[in-house]
């Protein structure tokens, strides 16, 4: 029996008046341990889908479940706790605090978990070792390359050991060599057991991940998972 960490059923998300559907009826399951790319052009609805999977937003219609929990049935406080303990986020812009060392940037990822400062720093050091930055712990963002800053951001996202990691355009601000390093790191984290969903407009990046889900106009147009309704590799749909 598979363990679905993400389960979306006919999920819609509308904005504005008259309402415009940014997500127009998505059914998608992601099993624990998968490494998935959600790929599509700008305006395709992939960022809305990220917000729904990450419980940053609630569906207008349909059902979204994270680890079996119905997002609609949870209070705002319960959703905040779910994000803090079960979901890690990585963004294109890094969102690191200037003037703060790498270890303290990562340790801040544990602030909302009630962890004492000494333990936060110990766990942050371990997370930085995990992403290959054990030698850069005392460096500040301005002293790090773009690829190193993104690795610090990833360390911060995984320091609490969430089972689900959501990465939004994680290589978007990086050169090709740094981008390759980040993709390799995501593969390594996945081999260690983290379920990872990467949101990207880059079909080449998506093709380097085991499963590709293409989205356009708020709907899934292809899914490379065996047995899916659209059992096909991402191709011209993501162009």
Image (cartoon, rainbow, N blue to C red):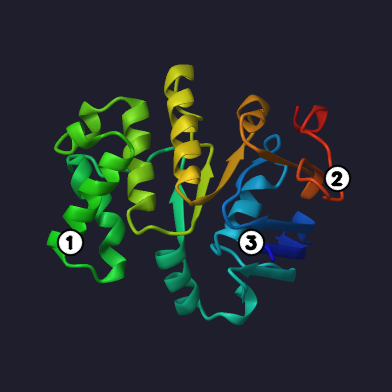
Q: Residues within 10 Å of mark 3 (few under 14, many from 20)?
A: many
Residue 6 numbered mark, or none: 3
Q: CA distance from mark 1 to mark 2?
A: 46 Å
User: Residue 2 placed where, x, y %?
Assistant: 67, 63
Mark 3 falls on what kind of element?
Answer: strand
Sequence-wise first label, 2 or 3? 3
Q: Which residue is mark 2?
A: 230
Quarter residue 99 falls in: top left
SS at badge 2 = loop
Q: Earlier in the sequence, mark 3 or mark 1?
A: 3
Residue on which disc 1 sits: 119
**Do we see residue 29 in this rendering?**
yes
200 to 55, vertically: above or below:
above
Q: Do the numbered discs 1 and 2 sit on residues whose CB atoms are within 8 Å? A: no
* Left or right side of 207 for 140: left
Q: Is residue 95 visible?
A: no
Quadrant of the snapshot with the N terminus: bottom right
SS for callout 1: helix
Q: How far, Cα to Cα, is label 3 from label 1? A: 30 Å
User: Which residue is painted at 83% across and 37% down in the image?
Assistant: 232
């Amino acid at each position: 029996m598979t363990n679905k960490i993400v389960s979306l059923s006919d999920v819609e998300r509308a904005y504005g008046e008259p309402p415009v559907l940014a997500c127009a009826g998505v059914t998608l399951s992601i099993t624990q341990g998968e490494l998935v790319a959600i790929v599509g052009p700008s305006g395709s609805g992939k960022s809305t889908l990220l917000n729904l999977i990450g419980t940053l937003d609630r569906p207008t219609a349909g059902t979204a479940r994270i680890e079996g929990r119905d997002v609609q049935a949870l209070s705002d406080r319960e959703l905040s706790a779910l994000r803090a303990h079960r979901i890690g986020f990585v963004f294109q812009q890094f969102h690191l605090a200037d003037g703060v060392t790498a270890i303290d940037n990562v340790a801040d990822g544990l602030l909302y978990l009630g962890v004492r400062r000494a333990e936060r720093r110990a766990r942050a050091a371990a997370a930085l070792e995990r992403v290959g930055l054990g030698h850069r712990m005392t460096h500040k963002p301005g002293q790090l390359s773009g690829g190193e800053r993104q690795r610090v951001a990833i360390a911060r996202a995984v320091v609490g050991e969430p089972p689900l990691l959501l990465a939004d355009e994680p290589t978007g601000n990086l050169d090709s060599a740094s981008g390759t390093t980040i993709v390799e790191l995501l593969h390594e984290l996945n081999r260690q057991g983290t379920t990872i969903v990467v949101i990207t407009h880059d079909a080449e990046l998506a093709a380097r991940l085991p499963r590709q889900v293409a989205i356009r106009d708020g709907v899934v147009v292809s899914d490379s998972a065996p047995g899916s309704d659209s059992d096909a590799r991402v191709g011209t749909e993501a162009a």
